[in-house]
């Protein structure tokens, strides 16, 4: 997308805390791409575009990404913690640094924000209310797509913005752990972690593509 908007100034921030600092500083750009909640994205008054991923695939990928490396820059020690975990450990743990990215991350991110502050602000709401908030916000997005069908997303993006996106694929996790996620126990733990995300994904497939 950044290449597609080559003629516009683009922000290089990635995470929401960076994004909020940049907004607070008064900096403005023509294009933003970051891991931010919908509330934060909507606050800049720009067209919002989002892509969701099939929830089980996403959480397996998250585990692989954290489990297979311990980078020099490891905020919160998440990589170090997960590197010694089995898939069952990962799905069962209540370590606070893991929960925001693991548990129904996509639903919280689109309802408001998946970070700690966003989750706390939604603590009094039922799962159904949070799901409905996410669905309402998705309806406000100019383009909604799925990782599993990026060609369709690219076509819709072009129809709306008149700009082409080059679609590529890169697997950053060379080693993968899959088996446990598809056992009965793994499925039960996954339901607790991504039950809302699965419902949101089905709504997107049925109504928003």
Image: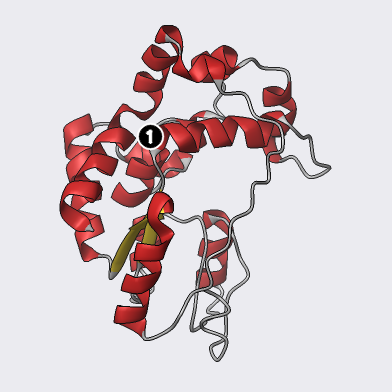
Q: How many callouts does the rendering have?
A: 1
Is residue 93 visible in the rendered structure shown here?
Answer: no
Q: Quadrant of the C terminus?
A: bottom left
- In percent of the image, x 52 and y 79: which residue is there? 26
Which residue occupies the foreground of this view, 122 or 50? 50
Which residue occupies the foreground of this view, 12 or 88? 88
Which residue occupies the foreground of this view, 196 or 58? 58
Q: Is residue 189 left or right of residue 136?
A: right
x and y, in percent, of residue 22 in the image: 56, 70
Residue that sits furthest to the top in the current view: 185
Residue that sits furthest to the bottom in the current view: 7
Q: Is residue 75 left or right of residue 132?
A: right
**Which residue, given by chain and number where applicable, does mark 1 sit on?**
104
- In percent of the image, x 39 and y 40: which residue is there? 54
Q: In terms of secondary structure, where does tag 1 sit? A: loop
Which residue occupies the foreground of this view, 144 or 124? 144
Q: Quadrant of residue 37?
A: bottom left
């Amino acid at each position: 997308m950044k290449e597609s908007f080559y003629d516009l100034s683009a922000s290089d921030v990635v995470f929401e805390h960076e994004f909020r600092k940049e907004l607070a500083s008064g900096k403005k750009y023509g294009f933003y791409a970051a891991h931010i909640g919908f509330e934060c994205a909507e606050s800049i008054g720009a067209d919002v575009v989002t892509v969701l991923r099939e929830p089980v695939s996403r959480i397996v990928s998250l585990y692989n990404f954290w489990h297979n490396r311990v980078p020099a820059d490891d905020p919160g020690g998440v990589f170090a913690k997960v590197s010694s975990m089995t898939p069952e450990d990962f799905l069962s743990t209540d370590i606070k640094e893991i929960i925001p990215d693991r548990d129904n991350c996509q639903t919280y991110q689109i309802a408001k924000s998946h970070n700690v502050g966003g989750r706390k602000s939604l603590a009094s709401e039922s799962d159904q209310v949070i799901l409905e908030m996410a669905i309402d916000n998705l309806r406000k997005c100019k383009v909604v797509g799925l990782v599993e069908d990026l060609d369709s997303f690219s076509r819709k993006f072009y129809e709306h913005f008149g700009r082409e996106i080059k679609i590529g694929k890169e697997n950053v996790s060379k080693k993968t752990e899959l088996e446990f996620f598809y056992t009965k126990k793994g499925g039960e733990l996954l339901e607790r972690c991504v039950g809302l995300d699965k419902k949101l994904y089905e709504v997107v497939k049925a109504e928003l593509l």
